[in-house]
Amino acid sequence: MTFVKSLSLLLAIPVVYFGPALPVHAQAIAEGVVQLPKPGPDLGINQGYQPHVDLPIVPANPPAAVVYLEGDFSRVPRPVVHATGQMPQKNITFAPDLIAVLVGTTVEFPNLDDTYHNVFSYSKTKRFDLGRYRRDEKPGAVLFDKPGAVTVHCDIHDRMRGTVLVLETPFFVKTDTKGNYRLEHLPPGNYLLKAWVTERDVRERPVELKNGSTLRVDFPGK
């Protein structure tokens, strides 16, 4: 399994069809490292519903970033989303707690714990509340139809926090836990390459992608 494919499985990114493939000679690669912040302290858990349920508590997800390409893709066939993304809830955390999806993607939030969960967001990009539901109940799915970062919470467990990064570009990938990334099958041209770490930490670099070339772009910390 390739590095990019394994990252896609980790991300639960929806399957996207990019239309007719670009010729092999008209593809470029960008790769590098995003310097990630150190993990924050584990604040424990405040469980406000069914407090007698005994669940294993695991550390929060390690830091990661989403790297994506921005620019004029008018010559690139418009992608068609035909799958659903997921952000499961497992061991009183969103796992993973950061996913990136293309605008128009529907995301599910399955409960894999033996206790109630609730998923809601007050983000301007997307406001919703799925209510409280158990492991054997299927919650409603959410259509993310506008670009932006959507922060999700559980009103039962205060420590739970996740982000759905909704993008208009079809060219994106999540880093591994060391900050490594690799974006393949990119169209040649001049673009902005961005690394989304948090809503307050979005780094960018102008890049020129050339046919058949691999461009190294690192994102040092601020």
Image: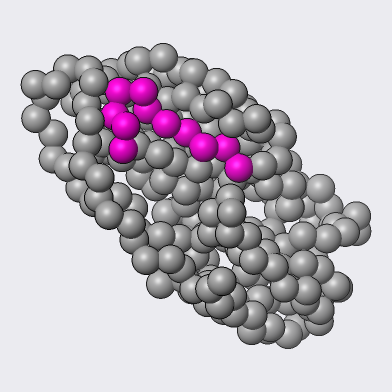
Rendered view: 97 above or below 218: above
| Residue 213 location (% of width, % of height) | 73, 85
Q: Residue furthest right?
A: 75
Residue stretch in magenta? 149-159
On the rendered image, what quadrant is the C terminus found in?
bottom right
Rendered view: 205 above or below 72: below
Give yes or no for residue 154 being in the magenta stretch.
yes
Is 219 positioned to the left or the right of 71 in the image?
A: left
Q: What's the residue at 81%, 48% (across, down)?
A: 78
Q: What's the residue at 21%, 42% (across, down)?
A: 44
Give yes or no for residue 29 being in the magenta stretch.
no
How many numbered discs? 0
Rendered view: 62 above or below 157: below
| Residue 33 location (% of width, % of height) | 52, 77
Q: Which of these two is toward me, 186 or 55?
A: 55
The answer to which image quadrant residue 138 occupies is top left
Inspect this view and state whether residue 44 appears: yes
Question: What scheme was used to colour the molecule?
Answer: one colour
Is 184 positioned to the left or the right of 19 in the image?
A: left
| Residue 170 location (% of width, % of height) | 71, 53
Inspect this view and state whether residue 187 appears: no
Q: Which of these two is toward me, 203 or 6?
A: 203
On the rendered image, what quadrant is the N terminus found in?
bottom left
The answer to which image quadrant residue 128 occupies is top right
| Residue 204 location (% of width, % of height) | 69, 68
Q: Which of these two is toward me, 109 or 98?
A: 98
Q: What's the residue at 22%, 36% (across, down)?
A: 45
Rendered view: 20 above or below 110: below
